[in-house]
Amino acid sequence: MKSIEEPVPLSMYIDENFIKPSGKPLSWWSKKLQVKYGSFCSAVNRETLPLSLIYALSDTIGIAPESLIKVQDNFLLHRYLNSPELPPPVPLIKPKKIPHLVRHVLVNGFLKPMNLSHQQLAERMKVPIHRCIGLFNGIKRRGYHDFELLGRLGAALGTGAKFWLDLRAKEDLDLYLERAPRAAKYFDWDPPRDFKSIHAADLETCERPGFVLEEKFIKPTGIPIRHWADFFCMRATSLTAVLDGKVLMDFRFIALLTKAFDKPASYWIELQTNYMSAQYLREYAPHHGIKPFQRNLDHGTKIKQSKLCNVLATEFLKPMGLTATDFARHIGGGSDFTSRLKAGGVRVGVELAVIFGQALGTSPAYWLDLQMADDLALRANNCTKKYGRKNGSPSTGKKYHQTKK
């Protein structure tokens, strides 16, 4: 028996390994598979077989359908890649930079799905429209956090202040690392983008970062403040302002803290965002009285995407800051392809798998395997609906291969 990984046509593989060794005529096989004799003879003389016949062969010869599909995919991929008229490769996509993370998440994760305008958001936050627009232009007050404005935003959208404080800190951290790339080794912090994973600040346990730094780290060393100021390359009065909470810890200061003490940068960043979130809840929230929008982001019309389209969107496009339209335009897809890609209904063949691999830096087989998983899942769902069985095929292959009238 030939190796199942050899790039041979599936019809040849079936003929040489199963039909000829069985000694049965093609009429017997066509009857066994519940396929018309003429159609079966025509199929085995072609290089590719339809999925319906592959599933029927799988049940008859006892080989998993994914193994047969891989034989066919390997042959088609080998033939396409060795074609003399192979089109020029699609250039690899470079990730798009997202300079304003708060704006990106706010617009694409909240305003668009909830069908809200800037004016409606400003009215619910109880701030002038120009302050709300400042969220989109990177305008900041009070250091690198305007925690009151971000707290109002969290109250209006029902996420809490810490979600937006973390996003703003990540946005500012990225800008800082652009100016000081050598400091990247000290920062391994990346906040979650899902607001459901952000818990509200505990008002009783959130201590001022400067107080924690002074009482738990600086005083136990017995080293005077002026010497610590020299270590942090700042004046003693500036360090005292940080310890008293008059000035926020910037990322240069946090990088030095990771060198001085056995705590990662994420510890100090979380300490500061937790405290500022609690400070908003203590000082401002009781007076604002902001009620969140009564809209559930989990509700609404959702299009059920295939596994392939879901992986494409979540594992590749979103982390790269790309939309489906951007991706379709990059690989030269038309408006019809763009619409199907947005709806999650794109079926990937060999040529498209090669294009996806070239654009995203993966192998074509990666996308062919995802498409095969979609095909098998669709077959299992259809089998469940028709026969009420969750796994496997019906007990009688004859009934299973009948077509609906």
Image (cartoon, rainbow, N blue to C red):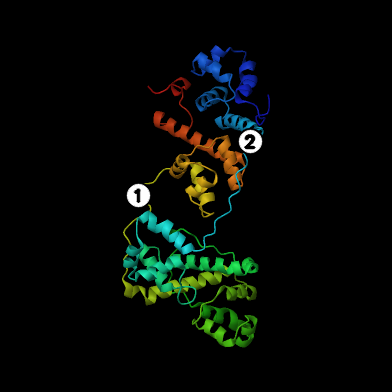
Q: State whether residue 347 is above or below residue 269.
A: above
Q: Quadrant of residue 331?
A: top right
Q: Residue drawn 55% across and 79% down?
A: 213
Q: Quadrant of residue 291?
A: bottom left
Residue 361: image location, x then y, percent: 61, 47
Q: Which residue corresponds to mark 1?
A: 300
First in sequence, mark 1 or 2: give its number.
2
Residue 124: image location, x then y, percent: 32, 66
Asked if residue 269 lies left or right of residue 110, the reply is right
Q: Is residue 389 visible?
A: no
Structural distance between the alpha carbons of marks 1 and 2: 44 Å
Residue type (three-letter) at the residue carrying disc 1: Gly
Q: Quadrant of residue 65?
A: top right
Q: Is residue 321 visible?
A: yes
Q: Which residue corresponds to mark 2?
A: 86
Residue type (three-letter) at the residue carrying disc 2: Leu
Given this view, does label 1 or label 2 mark the residue nearer the observer? 2
Asked if residue 371 lies left or right of residue 230, the reply is left
Q: Label 1: state its secondary structure.
A: loop
Residue 202: image location, x then y, percent: 43, 70
Instruction: Say which mark, if any, is on residue 272.
Output: none
Residue 35: image location, x then y, percent: 49, 18
Q: Residue drawn 48% across and 71% down?
A: 273
